[in-house]
Structure formats: structure tokens, C-alpha cells
Image (cartoon, rainbow, N blue to C red):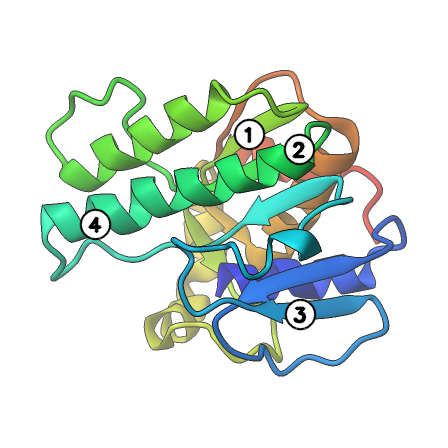
Amino acid sequence: MVGEGVLHECLLHREVEKVLVVNRRACGVVHPKLTEVFCPDFFDLSAIESELSGYDACLFCLGISSVGVSNEDYYHTTYDLTMNFAETLLKYNHEMTFIYVSGAGTDSSEKGRYNWARVKGQTENDLIKLPFKNVFAFRPGFMLPTNGLEHAKGYYSLLKFFYPPLRLFFPSYVSTLKEAGIAMINLAIDGYEKPVIEVKDIKVLSKKNIQ
């Protein structure tokens, strides 16, 4: 859902010249700015490495839920896969900004109660150590899906009726997917004063150069 929403905003944004989607299967979007490459195994990027150079930013939206997944599998998919992708990109794009979509509640101390939060925290911490131009840990909470997109989970569509009161009473935990997408683009263009981007920062960033 996040990847589709961010792609949508990138294709609309006047400052985005070209978008490369790395995917396991076709995303179903056709646009003059868009190029797709397919990679069935994100742990082995050797077949597509030649396609990955020359980009200013990576908006890394891949992730899985920890529900029903063993700690080992969650770590492998969340930490190992992300670090492998980032380290591969770094070989070809030292001036790149890497934006990792993490999540509200991520544990930067890596010592908290919840395994998912510790793993996300370790992933954020180790990404930030990599010598990219910039690395940002992007921590959205609940996001109202963008109308017309296909991949919003069913419960997100149901919760849209509760979005106005949620935004009123819990503003630090909710945003729109459009705000998140624009915020990520503005991060890539202008950077930010801190590496961890919470919902309140997403709202600030989304107000810059709104399309």
C-alpha cells in the first residue's frame, strides 16, 4: 500500500524526473517517467545491479507484518533483506538519499519488549551508519489511503470513516498516504534536520511545495 501511494505521488511530482520500480511482478502502472525491473529474489540482486545506478534517492517501502511470522523469518525479511538492498545500492550511488519506511513505535534502543520494534530499530540504526548522502528512518502511523489506488488493506478502507476524529484527537499518529508520499519526496530533495521522521515531521514535510 505504501509503495503504491508513494509511486503515485512521484509520478505526479514535477521535481521527479524518473522512477525505477524494483518489484517481483508488474505493478500495473504505465507512465512515461516509470521503468520497472523484476527481481524474484531480493537477496540476490546480481541480475539487476546494472539497472540501479544513477538515482538520487531510494524510497524503500518493502516490509511484512510480524503477525504469524517467526522471529527468525521476520528478522531475515526485515533486517537482512533491507541491508542487502541498501548495501548493493551504495556500491553504485554514494550520493543517494536512502529513506526506509519503518513504523511508529519502532524501538531505537533495540532493547524493548516487542521483537518487531527491536528489529525495526536495529534496521534503522544500521542503515543510518551507511555512508549514503542521507539516510532517514520514516515512521508513519495510520495512513488514510489515497482514493483510486488498489492495494489498501480492507481494514484501512473501513477505518477511513474514523479518520476525521482520529486526526483530531490523535494527530501524532495519523496522516494521509498522500502526505507521506509528498513528505518522502521532499526529504529526498531537501533533507531534514534529523534522521528519524515521526508523523508530526511527515506533516511538516508534506506542506513544502505541495503539488
Query: Is residue 98 among what the camera can see?
Result: no
Residue at image coords 57%, 80%: 26
SS category of the residue bearing label 3: strand
Label disc, if present, on residue 97 of the rendered structure:
2
| Cα distance between the residues tagged 1 and 2 | 8 Å
At label 3, which amino acid type do we have? Glu
Q: Position of residue 11 (x, y in %)?
A: 78, 64
At label 1, which amino acid type do we have? Phe
Name the one closer to the observer, 165 or 195: 195
Quarter of the figure with residue 13? bottom right
Label 1: few (<14), some or many (≥20) within 10 Å? many
- The disc, 3 or 2, on the residue closer to the chain's N-terminal end is 3
Residue beneath label 3, please?
36
Residue at image coords 63%, 44%: 58
Label 4: few (<14), some or many (≥20) within 10 Å? many
Label 3: few (<14), some or many (≥20) within 10 Å? some
SS category of the residue bearing label 1: strand
At label 2, which amino acid type do we have? Thr
